[in-house]
Amino acid sequence: MMTVTDFAQVSARARPSALGRVSSLFGFSGSVGLANLPVFSGKRWMVSRVALVASLGLIMGLGPFERMPGGRILGPEISTPVAHWRFVSAARQCALEVRPSYPHSVTVNCWHLDGQLYIGCMACEGKTWSRYVQEVPMARVKILDAIYPVAMQRVSKVEEVAAAWEARWLNMGRELPAPAVPGGYWLYRVTSR
């Protein structure tokens, strides 16, 4: 009579694991476990793990990285109020840090219309950062290499939203006419504080 242990041993020999099949493609033989693969053994494995953990800490703990949110943004802070934000045209995207008590940062589209800074948000309802702005409208925005303390106010006037949307369209290098402002689009007017 076959025991459970015998059955497991026969089954393992009859159907090699996916790792075993892959490792045989690369010339590994015998006992195949992660510890037997060169990349997962010795000092190299330890250094790889430390580098991975450090990299994730930097990405998640310090400012946003592309579409991944982050924590506190770093750089020199400019405390002088900004009257005209025309220089934002060189940036296209900005890092926005909200919730000062426990910073949360995201990468956003930013542009100006006649020197007024705007930040837009597609499908904004329910996004974490927009909720934080509703609770505390104080933020910091990183444009190029400098950080500016700002106050954010959601724009409700349809005419201002349409004009800012058209300015954003032109800032992206597209030709007029701009399409209609999409549903769920929120616009924030940003001022120095």
Image (cartoon, helix red, strand yellow):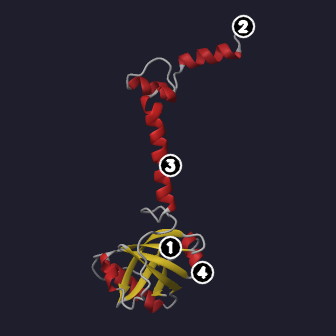
Q: Which residue is mark 2?
A: 1
- Counting from the top left corner in percent of width and height, residue 21 is at 45, 25
Image height of 57 relative to 33, above or below: below
Task: Tell me if residue 127 can be seen.
Answer: no
- Closer mark to the observer between disc 4 and disc 2: 4
Structural distance between the alpha carbons of marks 4 and 2: 71 Å
Asked if 46 appears above or below 54 in the picture, the reply is above
Q: Residues within 10 Å of mark 4 (few under 14, many from 20)?
A: some
Is tag 2's residue or tag 3's residue first in the polypeptide sequence?
2
Per the model, the C-alpha gap separating discs 1 and 2 is: 68 Å
Whichever of callouts 1 and 2 sits on the residue coming sooner in the sequence is 2
Q: Secondary structure at mark 3?
A: helix
Image spot of residue 54 (x, y percent): 48, 51
- From the viewer's perspective, is the residue at label 1 or at label 3 nearer? 3
Q: Earlier in the sequence, mark 3 or mark 4?
A: 3
Could you tell me how far apart the alpha carbons at marks 3 and 4 are, in whole angstroms?
32 Å
SS at mark 1 in the image: strand
Q: Say whether marks 4 and 1 touch (CB < 8 Å).
A: no
The residue type indicated by label 1 comes to Glu
Q: Residues within 10 Å of mark 2 (few under 14, many from 20)?
A: few
Left-right relation of 162 to 69? left
Going by the image, does 90 lie left or right of 165? left
Q: Earlier in the sequence, mark 1 or mark 3?
A: 3
CA separation in Å, label 2 and label 3: 50 Å
Q: Which residue is mark 3?
A: 53
Q: Amino acid at mark 2?
A: Met
Circles 1 and 2, Cβ within 8 Å, touching? The answer is no
Q: Residue 136's mark?
A: 4
Asked whether residue 175 appears in the rendered view, the answer is yes
Q: How many marks?
A: 4
Measure how far apart labels 1 and 3 are at the Cα level: 23 Å
Q: How would you rate the neighbour count of disc 3 (Cα within 10 Å): few for under 14, some for 14-19, many for 20 or more?
A: few
